[in-house]
Every structure is written in C-alpha cells, then in structure tokens.
Image (tube, rainbow, N blue to C red):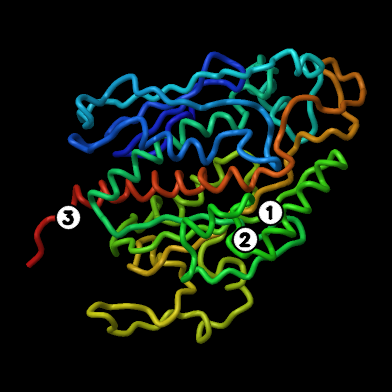
Amino acid sequence: MGNSFGQLFRVTTFGESHGGGVGAVIDGCPPRIELCEADIQRELNRRRPGQSTITTQRRESDRCEILSGVFEGRTLGTPVAILVRNEDARPEAYEAMRHTFRPSHADFTYEAKYGIRNWQGGGRASARETIGRVAAGAIARKVLRTLSPQLEILGLVKELGTVHAAVDLSNVSLETIECSTVRCPEPAASAKMIELIERARAEGDSLGGIIECVARNVPAGLGEPVFDKLEADLAKAMLSLPASKGFEIGSGFAAARMRGSEHNDQFEHRDGRIRTKSNFSGGVQGGISNGEEIVFRVAFKPTATIAREQSTVTRSGEETTLAARGRHDPCVLPRAVPIVEAMTALVLCDHALRQRAIDFPRA
C-alpha cells in the first residue's frame, strides 16, 4: 500500500494529522545499537511546529515514545516502534473542508482512490506524517555512525522564493545552519528569506524553494547498478515528501547544456585513494557511490494552504469558493530540512546494510 520504505532497513509510518498520534515501525535495525528517546527527540525538535515565528503555530511537543525493540538502552534486532501523540489537534477548524476540495491538496485524489478521506487537516496526506520518517532517520543515523563513523548529512535552504543563497558547502556545518531561523547559513540571504516569508504570511500567501543536501564521507560502493541505483532511491525518497516537486543530483539539469569534455569527472590519486578532480556526478556514478560528497537538491512548491479565497468545487460538483482556516506554514522549507536529512539517512543506511551483506573478503 506504499506505507513502507527500504529493503533491509525497512520503515513503515502510520497515523493521521488530527488522529490519536503518528509514528513509525522500523524493521531490520541491527541489534546492540545504543538508542534512547533523546537520540530521536533531538531530530524531532528540529522538525516540530511552533519552533519560530515563521512556521505554523500549532503547539505540539512531539514527544516520542519507544514502544518496542529497545532494552536497557540498546536495540534488540526486533522491530522498533515509535509513537508521537497528537496534543494540539483542532479538527473543527477543517469543518468547511468536509465536502469541499482544497486546491492543490490531496483531498480530491484521496477520495478518487479510496472513496473516503479524513478531511481533518489532510489526514494521512498531512506533513505531520513525516514525524515517523524523522524518528526512523534518527535511528538510521545511529546505525550509520557504527558502520561509517565519519559520515555526515547536512541539509540547508539554498533558495526561497526569489532569494538565492551563495553557499560554500565546504564551510557549512550544523551549527551555521541551525543558527538561522530559516536554516540558511548565509546571513544576508537568510535575513531576506525571513522577510519574504513574513510578507507572504501577511498577504495570506505562501512560498516555495530549494533545499540542498550534502552527505560527506560516504564510502564508495553503496547502491545497485540497475533499478536500485543510489540516486534513484534518493530521488524516490525525496519525491515522496509532501510538497516536493523536483530532484536533481550533482550537475542535475545543467548537465544537459554541457559537453562531455566539460562534465566528465576525471580521476586522480589524492589523499591516499582514488578521487575525482570535479564532482559533476554528485558522488554517484553508475548508480553507485564513488566516495565523493553526495550533493543533491530538492524543489518544494509553495504551501498549498493559503488564506486567500480560491475557487473550487464540492464533492457533488457544485462550484464554490474557499479560504483556508487552520494553522499552516507559509513556507515548508525551514522544517523540511531535517526531513530531507532523515530520508537521506534512511537511503544510505539501507544501502550500507545491503553492501555489508555482499561484502565478502576480496583477493
């Protein structure tokens, strides 16, 4: 039914926006990994609503509970179940949407598919579903630290609306990203982005943008050469996120305007190993990681829920208008950064375990 992701490290998320709670079940997590709720809570706090004036003001602590799979601070190798209870649900705010389809939401398509939908805040289609992904991603990071201690995953807001940040990825750190409310490490661009978001909210409108993600110190050899190429799984992971509309890795679409002599990443022996002089490939060649930084970008559309009146139709086909109510992000990007990181961790963890399963001693 499309609620699970991954092969060896497999994650199934559950829950609706205004139901009793949301969460995830992680199957395939190796045993004896040190894990406690604080490890997961740290990432959930980066995603939670109400963390700044430019995000939704829904008040949720997003406190996680580990229900299974952990004993005396270590994983058992059995399914790990994580639950986050909804505390500030206000389903009455969505009464007007009971029989009316919101523009650019999943209301109509869900009803077309299932013949029924949870109209309270979008139900399963709400971005609140991503809590389970972030919780699972926190566990994936713990596994990756055991397998590849130097591996690091960082996401940042590269573009927001008309503002483009000139970011040198070599100088980016978690601290420089997190010191910005909008999670853009370039101070001047960050200030302009915040101003744009505040203006859009005041006008009852919304904004989109681009998140860039870099994974450093990824070992060479992760990924499969045909259908499960590393960049293909990363693309699926990112395009499964709410509001995502595009994915590109390395040079991306710019490669279409280059010649092979410009684009090819030539090899050299540097720092005691085989490296590439450039990184137009974005760290992946032939579907397999080459040991360079994995760099990709994800485009997010403007938040579909806006306070402006828009034309739409009811379930019976009657034309009407609708101005959305409820508490919503005028721009999803600041809170989407940890979600992008989490999905990256899930993909890399799954492929690291798959590579470990076939990595026999070599002659």
Q: Residue at x 46, y 67 (%)?
A: 282
Q: Nearer the viewer, residue 124 or 305?
A: 305
Instruction: Select label 2 or label 3 by which is in front.
Output: 2
Checking the image for residue 158, the label placed there is 2
Classify mark 1: helix, strand or loop.
Answer: strand
Q: Residue at x 38, y 40 (%)?
A: 138
Query: Relative to 352, is 318 above or below?
Result: above
Determine crowd level at label 1: few under 14, some 14-19, many 20+ residues with C-alpha closer than 10 A.
Answer: many
Q: Amino acid at mark 2?
A: Lys
Q: Which residue is mark 3?
A: 359
Q: Which residue is mark 1?
A: 209
Q: Could you tell me if the residues under marks 1 and 2 are in contact, i.e. CB atoms within 8 Å?
A: yes
**Gap between marks 1 and 3 measured at Cα:** 40 Å
Residue 91, x across and y down, in percent:
69, 15
Determine crowd level at label 3: few under 14, some 14-19, many 20+ residues with C-alpha closer than 10 A.
Answer: few
**Gap between marks 1 and 2 measured at Cα:** 8 Å
Q: Amino acid at mark 1?
A: Gly
Q: Amino acid at mark 3?
A: Asp
Classify mark 3: helix, strand or loop.
Answer: loop
Q: Residue at x 20, y 26 (%)?
A: 72
